[in-house]
Image: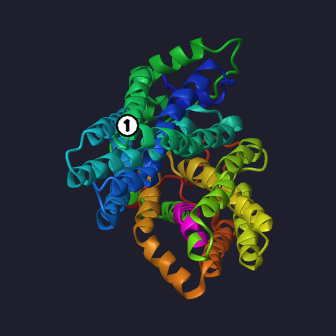
């Protein structure tokens, strides 16, 4: 093909239409079952112990291999997405964790279940990298923040649905049914998603211009009304972009920024939401009352992303992350001094809402926007891999802080973590709102190097 395809300019000029909503539904459905399968650990492990199939030591190993799988999955998704294509990555990871869920439903022993869970975790860890990256490449700049935060709303709802389903299904049928439901749902979405197109941005970046042109024409034909003229630009063809590009100037700034965002949002959210029921029990509350408190607080996992839908494209990801981080710091500073149950629940709800808003804007919206098409998935995958890897050691830190200082120590650590990240974003962050992904590439925001590949030569 002789003339430039101009995938970025042609995608960015499109009004939001049926194509964008179809991509959102199908990518969101995969992320919903990712959250469903990832969040079933608590209920399943309790049932395993109650039935005598497992014990606390084996359950601990089950949790550990899950985090290991999630970490590996995030890294592999980045490599596969950039080398083999976005479409391959999002279909393969969904097929992997869907198939492993069905295998888990018929596992003959706990040791087999642990091994299967590790493989399942690889698929689960890849879905967030792939889902947010895919959405950012299809949606125009004016609506990119809104669509990625809607994805987070859909994903977060999986946590509530799995709790509701588990409440009825596990006592009636047993824990195997949870894996069967998750696996069947994931494989059904895999079947529906098989016709989603490859990213024209990626196709053009690897020189597959005819496929990019055919895909763009099909998308444009779904758009009603006349389209704005295309500004012709030349997209350089890069046969291979090495992973080391993430550590060159000025890309290293983006890499470290993405890592800091992912570590903060994953460690911060996990340190509070996963442990708060145990903290309440240790401080004398009954299990029923502690779960009631925790449920009221964790409803903020839906409220936060809903706020993000309203503000992501208005105030921007950078300012939104800073506002959410300051909210986490303020609520974290207040929380340890509260004694009234209603005040504790309200403050906890606001804290979880701010954490979830931070995650939606930071991990979902900001991280993939920091990297160009040629290495977007590897940049996002490295950042998520680091964040998920940090979770492996987080339980030991949380337990130590709680033993020494109680809930106040854990929440103070969370507050300081978010406040430090706010300072980092304020000093080193860039604003991505309303800007083309290509304009956001290193060198496009006033940075001195126009072609970061020069650094690798």
Residue 135 against residue 334 in the figure, above or below: above
- Image spot of residue 303 (x, y percent): 71, 48
- Image spot of residue 353 (x, y percent): 70, 56
Q: Secondary structure at mark 1?
A: helix
Residue 287 against residue 84 in the figure, above or below: below
Residue 407 against residue 163 in the figure, above or below: below
> Residue 38 magenta-drawn?
no
Residue 370 against residue 95 in the figure, above or below: below
Magenta span: 261-280
Label 1: how many Cα within 10 Å (few below 14, some 14–19, many 20+): some
Colour basis: rainbow
> Residue 262 magenta-drawn?
yes
Q: Quadrant of residue 225?
A: top right
Q: Quadrant of residue 359?
A: bottom right
Find the residue positioned furthest to the bottom: 404
Q: Quadrant of residue 151?
A: top right
- Image spot of residue 449 (x, y percent): 53, 58
Tell me the quarter of the image containing the C terminus: bottom left
Tell me the quarter of the image containing the N terminus: top left
Of residues 26 and 247, the one drawn nearer to the viewer in this rendering: 26
Of residues 213 and 78, the one drawn nearer to the viewer in this rendering: 78
For the point 44% across and 68% down, the residue is 390
Of residues 137 and 120, the one drawn nearer to the viewer in this rendering: 120
For the point 56% across and 23% down, the residue is 22
Residue that label 1 marks: 177
212 lies left or right of 370: left
Q: Main secondary structure of the magenta part?
A: helix
């Amino acid at each position: 093909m002789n003339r430039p395809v101009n995938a970025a300019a042609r995608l960015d000029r499109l009004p939001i239409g049926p194509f964008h909503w179809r991509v959102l539904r199908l990518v969101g459905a995969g992320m919903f079952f990712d959250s469903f399968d990832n969040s079933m650990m608590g209920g399943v492990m309790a049932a395993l112990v109650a039935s005598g199939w497992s014990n606390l030591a084996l359950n601990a190993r089950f949790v550990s291999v899950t985090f290991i799988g999630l970490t590996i999955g995030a890294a592999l998704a980045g490599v596969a997405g950039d080398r083999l294509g976005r479409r391959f990555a999002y279909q393969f990871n969904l097929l992997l964790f869907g198939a492993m869920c069905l295998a888990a439903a018929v596992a003959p022993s706990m040791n087999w279940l642990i091994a299967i869970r590790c493989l399942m975790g690889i698929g689960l860890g890849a879905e967030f990298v792939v889902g947010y990256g895919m959405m950012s490449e299809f949606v125009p700049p004016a609506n990119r923040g809104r669509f990625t935060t809607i994805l987070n709303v859909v994903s977060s709802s999986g946590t509530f649905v799995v709790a509701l389903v588990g409440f009825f299904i596990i006592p009636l049928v047993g824990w195997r049914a949870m894996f069967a439901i998750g696996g069947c749902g994931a494989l059904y979405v895999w079947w529906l998603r098989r016709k989603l197109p490859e990213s024209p941005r990626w196709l053009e970046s690897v020189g597959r211009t005819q496929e990019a042109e055919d895909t763009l024409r099909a998308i444009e034909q779904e758009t009603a009304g006349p389209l704005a003229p295309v500004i012709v630009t030349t997209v350089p063809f890069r046969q291979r972009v090495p992973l080391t590009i993430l550590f060159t100037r000025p890309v290293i700034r983006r890499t470290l920024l993405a890592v800091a965002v992912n570590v903060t949002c994953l460690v911060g959210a996990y340190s509070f939401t996963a442990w708060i029921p145990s903290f309440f029990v240790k401080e004398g509350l009954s299990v029923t009352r502690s779960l009631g408190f925790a449920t009221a607080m964790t409803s903020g996992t839906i409220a936060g992303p809903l706020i993000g839908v309203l503000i992501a494209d208005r105030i921007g990801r950078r300012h939104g992350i800073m506002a959410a981080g300051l909210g986490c710091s303020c609520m974290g500073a207040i929380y340890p001094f509260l004694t009234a149950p209603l005040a504790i629940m309200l403050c906890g709800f606001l804290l979880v809402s701010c954490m979830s808003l931070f995650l939606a804007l930071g991990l979902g919206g900001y991280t993939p926007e920091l990297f160009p098409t040629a290495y977007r998935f590897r940049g996002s995958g490295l950042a998520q891999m680091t964040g998920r890897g940090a979770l492996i050691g987080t339980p030991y830190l949380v337990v130590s802080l709680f033993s020494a200082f109680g809930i106040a120590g854990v929440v103070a650590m969370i507050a300081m973590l978010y406040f430090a990240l706010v300072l980092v974003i304020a000093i080193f962050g860039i604003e991505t709102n309303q800007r083309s992904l290509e304009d956001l590439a290193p060198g496009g925001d006033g940075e001195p190097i126009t072609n970061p590949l020069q650094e690798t030569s």
